[in-house]
Amino acid sequence: MTLHHVGIALGAMIFSAPIINGSAPAVPSDATSTNHVAATELVATLSPVGSSRIAGSVSFKPGKDSSQINATIEIRGASLDEQHPWQIRNGRCGESNPAIEGAVAMYRKLSVRADGTANIRQTLTTAMPNPATQSVTVSQSPNDIDVIVACGNLSVNK
């Protein structure tokens, strides 16, 4: 084997992924941080919390770059003329006081129609949430942001 061939063989060993016990090493799904994931569609089913009747759905799709997401939020079971803030939370449904991701002001409020439904399509300036550690909540009112009436854990749309 010539020195040239040894260099090629050595380069192949350095740049190829080792296979141990028949499987390649895990590749992290989040190359930027533990709170955000690579671009993919995320969804959540919003379920009522406590005595609330509010339920719905959430969809997040990648925006024009990694600093934006396109959000679609739909709720039903609310009362006419109510205003319900929604948020991405750093925590899963049922966890005690999960922190809000970003500024509260970046989320538009859901304005309830006569049929008890509301929906929003909004572009947020934030990275895609991490479905393993984050959820979406709907609050009782702008004055009761910490009173959660619906919650859904994020997951990758399959």
Image (spheres, helix red, strand yellow):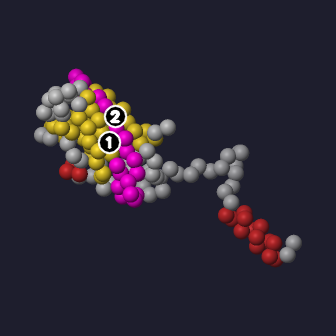
The residue shown at (45%, 51%) is 39
Residue 38: x and y, percent? 46, 52
Instruction: Give SS at disc 2.
Output: strand
Amino acid beneath label 1: Thr
Q: Residue 29 magenta-drawn?
A: no
Specify start and end residues of the magenta stretch as a single range: 50-70
Residue 45 visible in the snapshot: yes
Badge 1 is on which residue? 72
Q: Residue furthest bottom?
A: 3
The residue shown at (40%, 39%) is 43
The residue shown at (71%, 45%) is 22
Q: Quadrant of the N terminus?
A: bottom right
The residue shown at (37%, 36%) is 44
Which of the 4 quarters of the picture holds residue 142?
A: top left
- Gap between marks 1 and 2 measured at Cα: 8 Å
Left or right of 148 in this view: 6: right
Foreground residue among 21 and 78: 78
Q: Residue furthest right?
A: 1
Residue 20: x and y, percent? 70, 49
Badge 2 is on which residue? 57
Do the CB atoms of the residues marked 1 and 2 lie less than 8 Å apart? yes
Callout 1 environment at 10 Å: few (<14), some (14 to 19), or many (20+)? some
Amino acid beneath label 2: Ser
Foreground residue among 89 and 68: 68
Residue 152 visible in the snapshot: no
